[in-house]
Amino acid sequence: MRQRLLSEGAKELAYEIREIVKKAVKVQALGQAIVWENIGDPIQKSGVVPQWMKEIISGLTMENSTYSYCPSKGELNTRQFLAKLNNDRGGVSISAEDILFFNGTGDAISKLYQFLKHNSRVIGPSPAYSTHSSAEAAHANADPLTYKLDHNNHWYPDLDDLYLKVKFNPNIVGILIINPDNPTGMVYPIETLKRIVEIAKEFNLFLVSDEIYLNITYNGAKAYSLSEVIEDVPGIAIKGISKELPWPGSRCGWMEYLNRDKDPEFARLCSALDNAKMLEVCSTKLPQLAIPKILGDPRYMPYRLAQNEKVGKRSKLIASILGSLPQLKFNETYGAFYNTMIFNDGILKKSQKLKIQNPEIEKLLKEWLSENDVALDKQFVYYLLAAKGICVVPISSFCSDLQGFRVTLLEENEELFIKTFTTIKEAIEEYLAS
Ligand SMILES: Cc1ncc(COP(=O)(O)O)c(C=O)c1O
């Protein structure tokens, strides 16, 4: 090419949650059945959308108007419905004009960072959900900036770490919260959120809160929306239906601008996002039409609560299987549907292994392990895949120096769920003892 085509930041665009799938597919092709513990797709994992929701959606497909474009910002009626849903929680009020629809929250996330100046940075949690950290880092042509979630303290944010990083880096213009969190399953306590708001206020920052799991909490936990705590600080809440309904294939999510009028620079960012969507025309319409009909249906809340209870039960089951392993730092989860377990310091060694029955799979594994700089937790993850057919994600792939792995709490079949986690436990014991 006449010139280099890619920016430096393009190298940040790796997505390990799906990368590991390529390897798992190769193992599968060699005859090993795979348990997919890598991706947070409830449907792929055996979840079923209730019949009544499907009827609402199929009814919409019979209306001719469903097939046209919708307004650039999204269906007005849906935005009015969502604004009311937010306003009913108390806190900062918004109108339909403060809502902008995207083709999934993933789309919202990549657009959000795109228009910031290269050196205007948003600091996010580590371990990091890589759609945020990669998109932010790609816009900045630099490594992601992160604050620590502390696995020795329920995965709560280390607020001193956050404060000092913000204080000593004048390029930081925003703080990201993922509440409830992926990959840790932690729910930000309200006091923590209030402290983050204080930090934003002190340094004149905006806040971003990814709330795609806001209504997925269990075992007594409640997640607070940014709008409930933000007072007069500018912020953006990102929400969607991929996990809640669940309908990940809808590719539908939205932003809610909070206190748009409180800062002219922030107002300009919101307008840039609105205008960019106008250039694209609009986002997927069918799910937008379905939102008020489904979320407003009296069957919705009881359904969601029953689903949450099931996830909560699985969270306890995992705790009963893996919680007492002395080689792991285990935290119980209270939101979203993941758990991240961390190996004790220094316990993972290059020489450790699991027995692989199939010589062809063993050969494949050897190839992967000969790649440059395979992190020790990634090595464990590769062995778990090759020996037991269980596909999890190494935590070193989530912008973290820790060594561990993430699993999901999505398997609906309890027997299979227990079997999978018992196998993981036995694999950890065999691997560490090897
Ligand atoms: C925290 C978080 N935000 C956003 C997304 C992307 O969701 P969507 O399907 O709406 O793009 C995910 C998906 O796993 C997620 O975990």
Image (tube, helix red, strand yellow):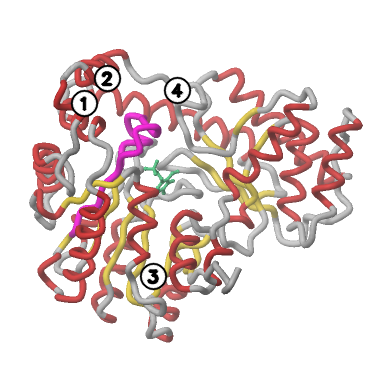
Q: Residue at x 25, y 23 (%)?
A: 302
Tell me how far mark 1 sits from mark 4, CA to CA. 17 Å
Residue 268 position, x and y percent, is 19, 71
Q: Position of residue 339 (x, y in %)?
A: 53, 43
- The disc, 1 or 4, on the residue closer to the chain's N-terminal end is 4
Looking at the rendering, the stretch of residues picked out in magenta corresponds to: 240-257
State the mark number for residue 1. none
Where, quadrant-wise, is the N terminus in this rendering?
bottom right
Give above or below for 302 relative to 339.
above
Give the secondary structure at mark 2. Answer: helix
Residue 227 placement (x, y as % from top left)? 19, 56
Residue labelled with disc 4: 47
In-image side of 131 versus 279 (left or right): right
Image quadrant containing the C terminus: top right
281 is higher (above) or lower (below) than 61:
below
Give residue 294's mark. 1
Which circle marks residue 122 in the picture? 3
> Distance between the Cα atoms at labels 1 and 3?
34 Å
* Tag 2 residue: 53
Q: Characterize the local packing of mark 1: few (<14), some (14-19) or many (20 or more) Cα atoms within 10 angstroms.
A: some
Q: Amino acid at mark 4?
A: Gly
Q: Earlier in the sequence, mark 4 or mark 2?
A: 4
Estimate the spatial distance between the alpha carbons at disc 3 and disc 2, rounded to whole Å. Answer: 37 Å
Q: Is residue 174 magenta?
A: no
